[in-house]
Structures are given as C-alpha cells and as structure tokens.
Amino acid sequence: MTENWVQEQRKSIYNFLNNYFSSDKFSVDRANAYSVVSEKNHFWRPLLVLSSAKSFGVDESISMPIACAAEVGHSGTLIMDDLPSMDNADTRRGKEACHKKFNITVAELCSLDLCAGHSYSLIFNSKIEDKKKLIIAYNQPKTIIDIVRGQEQDLFYLREKKKPSQEEVINSYSLKTGALFSHCCYAGGVLGNAEFEELEMLKEIGNSIGIIYQVADDVKDKTGSRAEIGKPIGQDADSGKWTLIDIVGLQQTKTIMKKYFDKLKLNVKKLKSNGQNVRYLESVLSEIF
C-alpha cells in the first residue's frame, strides 16, 4: 500500500509542478520548467515533506504546495551548482545542465527565480494557516544560508592542499545537503502540529539523510558510471576535492554511513513510539536508500 502511495505522490508532484510552470513567456520560464519538471525525477525532498506531514495525519492536498516549494528551491540550487564558476557540470539528471541548454545568464536568473521567488510564492499562496506559513518560510532562509556556506566549503576549503578532518567534511555535507532534507522533514512536522521534541527528531532524520546521501554520492563518483548517476563521474578527483573516502578510506566511510543509518532509524523509531504513523516516511526512506 505504501509503495503505491509513493508512486502516486510522485505523479502528483510532477502534475502539480507541470501545471505550476506552464508559462513560456520568458526564457527564464522555459528554463524553470526544464529544470524542475521531469517524470524521471525522484522527488525525494517533496516526498519527505508529504510523508512527514502524513505521519501526523495531514492530507497530501494540504502539504503538496509546501512539498513542491522544497523541490523548487532544491532545483534552483542545482542550477547554481552546475555553473562553470561552481562544479562546471554539463549534465544534470541525465540531460543537459540548465546553462548548457539555455545560457549562463538565463541559468543564473532561473536559479534566483526559483530560490528567492517561486519557493516562497508556493508557501504563501498555499491554504495552510498563516502561522504555519510564517514558521516554514522563516526556516527556509536559514536553510539557504546553510546550503550556501556548505557550497563555499565544497568549492574552496575541501579543495585546498591541506587535508581536512573527518568532522570538517561531515559538517560540509550537513550544511550543503543535510540542511534541505532537514527542512523538508521539519516542514512536514510543522504542518502536522508536531511537538518540539518531535520537530527536533524530524530535523535529525533529515540531517542524517543528507549526510548519508552525500557520502553515497561520493562513493558513486568514485566507483559508479555516468549512466547510473546522470552526471559526469570523477568530478571530485578532477577538481582536487577532498571527500570522506580520501580522509578515512572506503571501508571506514561505510562504517560512518552505518552510524548515521542507525541514528536515522532510532529517530524514526522514537516517532513511532510517540504514536505517529511513520509507515509512509519509512517507505520513502526505503526508496532513497
């Protein structure tokens, strides 16, 4: 049942975004639709909003705009991440990166439009209570700030000749990737009137997902194929970037991943002990990993 739910909601997310980005008046409108809307997208982040909210009894029709706001903001950061001044990637999600399909200027405008415009518009035009709109919207800038700081560390500090520590690498993963996953789980809890301790559990769940996700991405970059990950492989090595694998080796990296998996499972178990229906959240997690 929950497996069908994930597939159904993935289709609903696609349909919502496809309808939302229907304008093609400007080049940036077309770039938005190109970058955000694809039936091939996993939509992990909006699915985490939906499943976290559903854990507290919130219907998907209520949480969908908030879920899609997270995906829109995420897509904006990916566009920026691919630019020549950043990771200089030609492909994203199995197709040309936004700046290659259009041009750098349109891509920069598109990233700004998604992160600073549409992601907030979706929140404030939703049908949720005004108080919840403000709480979620207030947390979003902090999330973007963390992502930007994580990206700076990724671009500069982790590419210096000096070998960073294991803790410093994990912190950069937490900022760059964990922050948005954390926001998604937190937003779902806010929608469901979660208690403070439950909101903290949800944020920890999201942060653990982000760290595991980033480490797994590093492993794929070292050992995977372009077809598997939908972007060029070996980018970290080519750019001189330190990864956790470089610091502690592949086997120890897997041990660290297990540590965060255990932490993730523990927090989900705590939510379940509190009487929350975590089946849908567990189903999304099983697909991510």
Image: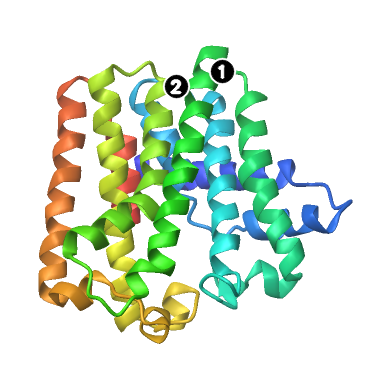
Label 1 amino acid? Ile
Q: Quadrant of residue 143?
A: top left
Q: Give the residue number, with chain letter if any, for mark 1.
A: 128
The answer to whether one can see residue 258 in this image is yes
Mark 1 burial class by Cα count in 10 Å: few <14, some 14-19, many 20+: some
Q: Position of residue 216 (x, y in %)?
A: 29, 66
Q: Position of residue 86 (x, y in %)?
A: 53, 70
Q: Position of residue 57 (x, y in %)?
A: 38, 20
Label 2 amino acid? Leu
Q: Give the residue number, with chain letter if any, for mark 2.
A: 191
Q: Position of residue 277 (x, y in %)?
A: 28, 26
Mark 1 to mark 2: distance in Å? 8 Å
User: From the viewer's perspective, is 90 left or right of 173?
Assistant: right
SS label for mark 2: helix
Question: Mark 1 vs mark 2: which is more N-terminal?
Answer: 1
Look at the image and tell me in which quarter the N terminus lies: top left
Contact flag, marks 1 and 2 (Cβ < 8 Å): yes
Q: Quadrant of residue 31?
A: bottom right
Mark 2 burial class by Cα count in 10 Å: few <14, some 14-19, many 20+: many
Vertical side of 36 occupied by 236: above or below = below
| Nearer-the-camera pick, 131 or 17 | 131
Vertical side of 43 occupied by 118: above or below = above
SS label for mark 1: loop
Look at the image and tell me in which quarter the C terminus lies: bottom left
User: From the viewer's perspective, is 148 left or right of 285?
Assistant: right
The residue under the point 63% across, 54% down is 36
The answer to whether one can see residue 40 in this image is no
